[in-house]
Structures are given as C-alpha cells and as structure tokens.
Image: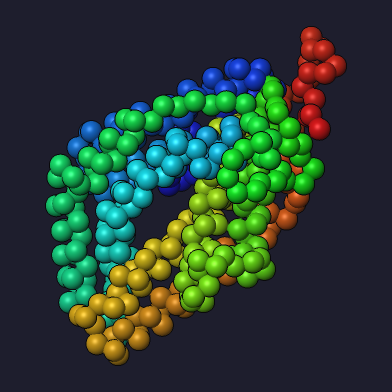
Amino acid sequence: MPGGHHHQHSVGMNWNAASSEEARSELSRVISAQLARACEALELGKDLASTVHETRRAIKRARALLRLAVPWSTNSPTDTTLRDASRILAIVRDADVVVLTAKDIRDGSPPSQPSLVPLHLLESLEEERRRRFAESGSADGPLHAATELLRSVVVEVRDARAPEAMAGPERTAPDGMEATALGGTEILRLGLAASYAAVRAQSDQAAGEGPVEASVEASVDASVDERSHKLRKRVKDLRYQLEFLDIGQPKLGRLVRDLHHLTNLLGDRNDLATLWRYTASADVLCETERAALTAHVDGRKQALQSEAAALSARLFEEEPDYFVRQIERWVTPPRGPAQSPSQGRPQG
C-alpha cells in the first residue's frame, strides 16, 4: 500500500458503538467482504503476480479480523482453510519475489565489479518463475485449489471464550485482561490485547530474548529467519486490526503507518532470505559467486533486522493492558451532553 495505509472496508468501527451482536455482525461482514475480494482477484484474470498478491493480502486481512473476534481460534476450521489457501499461493509468490529481489541486487551492483547476481543465475530464476506461472492455472494448479478452498469457507464470528475452555494447546490471556466469556465490544478489547501480546512475544524472540521453538533450533540462520517471518505475520495481524478500528484518529493513523513500515522492513528481509534459500544449492553458481552473494544478502538482512528491532522496541514497549486502553481512548468519541455517564468512557 504505497503512500500510507488505507481501509479495506467502508468505515472504522467505533469502540463502544456496537452491542456484542452488532460487533460480531460487523466483523463477519468485513471478513466476508475480504474473502469476496480474494475470490474476485482470482477471477479477474489480471497479471498473475498482482492476482496472487491481492488474494493473499485479502486472506491475511480476513484472518487478522477473525483473530480479533476469537483470539485463540487459530486452529479453527475457517482459519486453517484460509491459511492453506494462502500457503498454496505462496509458491507462486516466492517464485516471483526471488526474481524481483535478484534484479534489485543486480541493478545495485557496482559497474566496476562482477555482478553479485550473475546473468546465468537470473536466467535460471526467471525460468523457474515461468514454469511456476505456467503450472498455476492448470486444473490442479494453485489458483484453482485456492479458489476451491475460499469458496468452502463459512464465516461465523462468535463471542470470545475463555482460553481454558477451548480445545488445543494451553492458552492464557494477556496480563491484566479477563479470560472469561465476553459480551459487547469486550470482544475487541480481548482480541486486540491477545494480538499485541503475540507481537511482543515474537519481537522478543526476533531479538534473541525469548525461547526458541524446537522446530527451528537446527540452524542459527534458519532460526533468525523464522523468528523474523513470524514477527512480520503477527505485526500484520495487529496492523489490519487497528485499521479496522481506525475512525480517523491521527495518533492511531501514525501508529498504523509505523506498523506498515515495520512490516515492509521485515518483508524485505524475508525476500532476501527466500532468495538465499533458492540459490543456496543452485548448481548454476560457482563457490566464489555463491560466497559473494551470500555475504551481500547476510549484510543486508542484518541491517534490516537492526532497523526493525529498533522500531519494534519503540512500538511495543507498553504492556498489553495499557496499549489496549490507549487504543480505546483514541477510538472512543468524547462523551457528549446527551450521553449517560457510562457512555464514551474507556472501559477497564
């Protein structure tokens, strides 16, 4: 979204304006609209790269809003189906992004030195992209498979439930937040707190301050890449949720733009990591070429990681309960003379 954030729905949602039923209805409406947008993108027949990008972005928005309504429902059938559709399309996206990233590096190479991306490597990556693109529209290709998955989704937004009442891994509510059955727009408060807490946890891990999952312990580089990628996903969740709540408040708008910048930094880093995975075992590179490209990719990744870490430290320094109360103050209209004393007041 160049030039700042914009909404994928008609209007931001007033924090205290809706009952529980109205809040769920509005979330369901916006999630359904995002899924319709995703299906429409797949059917319009634009260039394939734009189609995949627009579809995956709509899916990610839908998943973020689903988590806003039901914070611990990451293993729900709806979320799982949407995740699978996005992953199917990621194969096509990755084949495209490695070519674009390689071209950026090649264009930035000093004219007086051998290119960090030799022409034979770029041609190999472009051939792989052509193959992936050609396969994508077949009867059993990713476009058809993703469309079928999206058409199978039934959006149902229910009241958030206590984590201990839900099946699956143990879940706990963020500090200071009640983990009880909720009504009214408390579903927004608890969902946002859970997303913010998840961002803080991933930010600590990306900075090397949190526990490392066993699945990524095998390689230090893979661990850092995985942590950074997971942080980006959680920051996107939070950003999309705040866009949904944004009714034009300047401070909230600035926060959303900062989150967008952070996802761009982490996205650029992830693109470099994806290129490195594609080229680490490429037989078209000699060892000297591979070493030069690896050194450049590692240096650029480290610079992006450092900038992202500094921004994360500033954005996520507050505890979840304080963060949520601040957002609530920003999106709750001032209490007018016609309102009762209980209206328009941040809820605790």
Q: Is 133 displayed left or right of 195 in the figure?
A: left
x and y percentages locating residue 129 in the rendered image? 20, 60
Instruction: Say which residue appears at 29% left-offset and 55% top-offset.
Output: 91
Quadrant, the N terminus: top left
Quadrant, the C terminus: top right
Count of all numbered marks drawn on residues in the image: 0
Display coloring: rainbow
| Residue 301 visible in the shown view | no
| 196 shown above or below 303 | above
Q: Is 11 displayed left or right of 57 in the figure?
A: right
| 106 shown above or below 101 | below
Q: Quadrant of residue 121?
A: bottom left
| 175 shown above or below 31 | below
Instruction: Say which residue appears at 30% left-offset and 64% top-offset.
Output: 98
Residue extending farthest top: 338
Instruction: Say which residue appears at 45% left-offset and 36% top-offset.
Output: 77
| Residue 40 visible in the shown view | yes
x and y percentages locating residue 250 in the rendered image? 64, 37
x and y percentages locating residue 113 in the rendered image? 29, 86
Q: Quadrant of residue 241?
A: top right
Residue nearest the observer in this picture, 55 or 190: 190
Residue extending farthest right: 341
Q: Is 175 displayed left or right of 34 in the figure?
A: right
| 155 shown above or below 306 | above
x and y percentages locating residue 232 in the rendered image? 51, 55
Instruction: Say which residue appears at 77% left-offset and 46% top-offset.
Output: 175
Residue nearest the observer in this picture, 292 or 79: 79
